[in-house]
Image (spheres, helix red, strand yellow):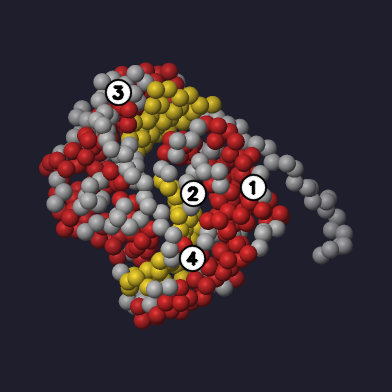
Amino acid sequence: MTGVDTGLPPRPSLGSPRPAALASRRREVLPSGMKTALVQSGGVPVVALRLVVEAGSAHLQPGQIWLDRLMHDFLREGSATHDRAQFADALATMGSSLDVDGDEHTTVLRTQVLAEHAAEATALLIGLARAPRFPVEETARLISDQQRWAEIASQEPQWRAHAAFRASLYRGHPYGAVLPSGSTMASFTASDVRAFWERHTGADRATLMAAGKFDADAVIEAASRASDSWQSPAVASVAGPVVRGERIVRFVPRPGSEQTTLRVGLPVPAPGHGDYIALEVANALLGGSFSSRITQNIREQKGYTYSPSSQISTRPRDAYWVESADVTTPVTMPALNEILGEIDRLRAEQPSDEEVMGITNYVAGLSAIRSATLSGLLDHLEFLAQHGLTDAYSAGYEAAVRSVTAAEIWRVTRDYLRPERLTIVAVGDPAEVRSGLEQYGAVIEG
């Protein structure tokens, strides 16, 4: 209560935030052509390792959707020198295990080991990438596993909304191919996977990343030996998508659904563009943080949804902004109206300096927190590599975020979050949702 003497000392005022220290980085290109990015961080003698190979879903041929996921499973089957059990045992003795995943442009082999095993683990990862086993006898089992995951994904509204959104945004481009058919996957062979891997991999298409407290010279030496004479075939680059500028409204029927899964988004400039950091801040203010306007509106105030969120999703030379929410079926249109209304409100009126200060502190602080972990450091190194950015981007990032003004947020929202260019996707009950979507434009079904 104002004016009441509580006997407590006055609340301290906030000081100026201290900039986060940039971890020391070492970058080299080995004689084989393999790139390295090593970061010394922390005081515990452990090291997180990643081998990032430029082979992802965007490189697949038509009719090969999820061949890359099958490839990830095959990579877990071991290398020419270590079968699955031997590979697992070798990492286990180092206190670790293997993780494999990927995206549109990369396949990533990950592990984290005690620092004394850094060189040995480096050689193990590169050996796996150079010569995976691709055991024919395991093909049926691995395909069956992937078919089962594909069947589950095809029934999940979030996957269906994501697939419909990407297909609408990237019509005819590999980025738009998200879900496979079971019959297509049944035709895959170990030879298909091997051919894809060998066609797209080599030393100069791979980057070794490491973060932790470790002997960098030993890691470089091990990587040089392990990658020596690893040849790289010539590979055509993936053409960028054609950015379209029209409103798209798409409905995916899910009869009887008690919720509607929504995606609302559009293309925006990619990292490296002069407006990208201001867009990151605008995203956090609009829907990308718990205190964001959309979240406070449709979650806290109206109770339409439990966990709405927005993000900027990126690929090389490409990005889109998207708001995601699962709302109860009866409030589908009110929730959509509020999402679109919050976009319009930010376009119509410049936010207050106080709101902008809070959100820039959040974005800068979140970056500092992520960079305090080994996995966060390597995530950032991958981000830099994917978008052709230098370490100068890291060094200036926090200051750039904190320098974003209310006027800049207002401008980038008006320039890029344009309602007439939005793709709107709804997965829900046709009897309750389909007709209401027509107020937003001609509805494409399926």
Earlier-in-chain disc, 2 versus 1: 2
The spot of residue 180 in percent (x, y) is 24, 56
Contact between marks 4 and 2 (CB within 8 A): the answer is: no
Give the number of the disc on residue 227.
Answer: 3
The spot of residue 429 in percent (x, y) is 36, 76
Horizontally, residue 266 falls left or right of residue 187, namely right
Contact between marks 4 and 1 (CB within 8 A): the answer is: no
Identified by mark 1, the residue type is Val
The Cα–Cα distance between marks 1 and 3, rounded to whole angstroms, is 43 Å
Contact between marks 1 and 3 (CB within 8 A): the answer is: no
Viewer-nearest of discs 3 and 4:
4
Viewer-nearest of discs 4 and 1:
4
Q: Which residue is mark 1?
A: 404
Identified by mark 2, the residue type is Pro
The spot of residue 313 in percent (x, y) is 45, 51
Give the number of the disc on residue 269.
Answer: 2
* Pointer 3 local density, CA inside 10 Å: few below 14, some 14–19, many at least 20: many
The residue that appears at 48% across and 55% down in the rendered structure is: 321
* Pointer 2 local density, CA inside 10 Å: few below 14, some 14–19, many at least 20: some
The Cα–Cα distance between marks 2 and 3, rounded to whole angstroms, is 36 Å
Label 2 secondary element: loop
The residue that appears at 34% across and 23% down in the rendered structure is: 33
Identified by mark 4, the residue type is Glu
Q: Which residue is mark 4?
A: 420
Label 4 secondary element: helix
Earlier-in-chain disc, 3 versus 4: 3
Label 3 secondary element: helix
The residue that appears at 46% across and 31% down in the rendered structure is: 211
The spot of residue 366 in percent (x, y) is 57, 46
